Amino acid sequence: MSLEQADLRLGFIALNDCAPLVVAKEKGFFENEGLNVDLSREASWANVRDKVSMGALDGAHMLGPMPLAVSLGVCGECTPMVTPLSLNLNGSAITVSNALARAMRELDPEGMAERPRSAGPLKALIEARRKAGAPLLTFAVVFPFSVHNYELRYWVAEAGIDPDRDLRIVVTPPPRMAARLASGEIDGFCVSAPWNALSVAQGHGEIMIYASEVWRGGPDKVFGVTEAWARRRPQTLNAMLRALLKAGAWADEPGNRGELAGLLSSPSYVDAPYDVVASSLVGSPSYAPSEPGPDSLDYIIYHRYAASFPWRSHAVWFLTQMLRWGQIDPSIDIAAAAEAVYRPDLYRAAAAELGAPAPLVDEKVEGLHVAPWVLDEATAPIAMASDLFFDGRSFDAAQPGRYAAGFEIGRLTPESGLGA
Amino acid sequence: MRVLIIDPDEARAALVAEGLRHVRPLEVKRVGSFEEIEADLERLAPDVIVIACESPDRDTLESLREATEGNPRPVVMFVDRSSPGLAEAAVEAGVAAYVVDGLSARRVRSVLEVAMSRFELMQKLRADLDKAKADLASRKAIERAKGLLMKDRGMDEDQAYRLLRKLAMDTGRPLGAVAADLLTFAGVLKGDKA
């Protein structure tokens, strides 16, 4: 079968989760598929979106919610996009400044001793500051349509904090987070690796909670192309997916994580100190200088537990968060949007060529598995991990409206007609 | 109409501002990053923000889509549906524009077109400068290589030049590169550190 296009230009942002693209390029997986790939480091997610939409890039490392938001026309120019593969699970965390952590500890030492940590101590501090007439605390996320925005909002809202009323949420590019926290311009942030570890290493911040604690095995970045691009170049896309699947498997081998940190830390990719990049790959980053993280490779997952499969239930979850926070209209057909963008069929075609196991179901219920389990509805059984949310909720993609309206804090009103 | 230019490249921003002088009535302010202007944005109240795509501030601008107390003027990315290809051309030129919702597309387009042409002009100027520098370096290497051949091989200038040209043709490489190699290897043979 011949490739429609061999020379490709793919975009990425400086984060540990761009690893499958970097590995596919540097370890020859793209080349083995006859692809000559040029990786282009982009300065913003908006650039990634526009360049892919307008054809200046063939595809890119994207925020999970982005292809959905662009396809729905709520983010940039409305362009149908597809997500044929996920790049990773987890990998982000919520960090606050030392000053904030200290104030939270003074008000609620018991809450600050818990793991996973709730935003209860933050709630106590916000109440105390309100009484004292202090200004709102400022938290930064990386983009309005990002898992980071939803993760931060989910975590704070569980403790009774309304992110739109009780906090000021701003957008800051990932590589600038640590500097803005150090200078006091922001009080906290939610960002992907390695930037939380950098703040801890520099002695300016403490990690409150990992994404892998908010929602074990929750989605993060994806690989995205336009629908038109995918339709016109099926063989090229299949070859790209094969290379990315192999690269993800390589990146998840425990013995390769050190080498991966070396590749990623280079100035042409993440451009951060090796130790900082490595701390989020060979284990979990320290919560604070005196509190090391658990010795687990699950802080970020590239391949294990069917990590690269584009679960439609992930798409639906992102859409429920857009609904919850008023980013999309409640009249949008959630299931249709998820089905148009998330394309497990494209994934299965690539996995089949490699003889790699692939799930045969498009969705899974999240938040039910306390312990590791086995996915039998697959071309070969796949070992899966726990998928719990820290607040004990579960999520069924078949009931998106009910789920989105089922939170005490959110922008959906009873008139939205979704709570029934 | 008030225009804010966000561009870490000061020279290019100046070029854009200069070009916009002819698009009246206009008030132009330029900054290197959004952070410099963030606190002042409400007072400045730009109608159009022209931003270099290489600036990381685009994501921050995207988050100003919703009108809030601190930002009463929602900002949207400018895409003119009546001009097919305009957005593609802007991305190609490395420039994006954000406008206050509801502004007339015709007026914004003239601003964007000036910005695009100045970005392209700057790129051409920089490319010309790089080429001029490379040409100069190559001419210097050729002069020095000729001098070396004249001194060590007793050739006259014309013979030295013809030898260099033959080497260039035989190896299919530019004359300047062959001359630079000759100088490097001559140094090694004389015992210089490679």
Image (spheres, coloured by chain):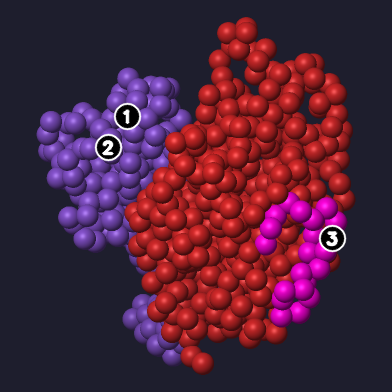
Chain colours: A red, B purple
The image quadrant that residue B127 belongs to is bottom left
Please name the amino acid that badge 1 sits on.
Arg
Nearest to the observer: residue A53 or residue A131: A131
Which residue shows up at 44% across the image and 90% down it? Answer: B170
Query: Where residue B176 sits: x, y (%)?
Result: 41, 73
Please name the amino acid that badge 3 sits on.
Pro
Which residue shows up at 76% across the image and 49% down it? Answer: A388
Mark 3 sits on what residue?
A372
Residue B73: which numbered mark, if any?
1
Q: Does the magenta stretch include residue A380?
A: yes
Asked if marks 2 and 1 touch (Cβ < 8 Å), the reply is yes
Q: Badge 3: how crowded within 10 Å, few (<14), some, or many (20+)?
A: few
Please name the amino acid that badge 2 sits on.
Asp
Mark 2 sits on what residue?
B101
Query: Where residue A142 sits: x, y (%)?
Result: 54, 42
- Residue A304 position (above or below residue B151): above
Segment tinted magenta in the rendering: A364-386
Determine whether the residue tagged by mark 1 lies in a helix, strand or loop: loop
Determine whether the residue tagged by mark 3 lies in a helix, strand or loop: loop
Q: Which of marks 2 and 3 is in front?
A: 3
- Residue A318 position (above or below residue A342): above
Do marks 1 and 3 share a subunit?
no
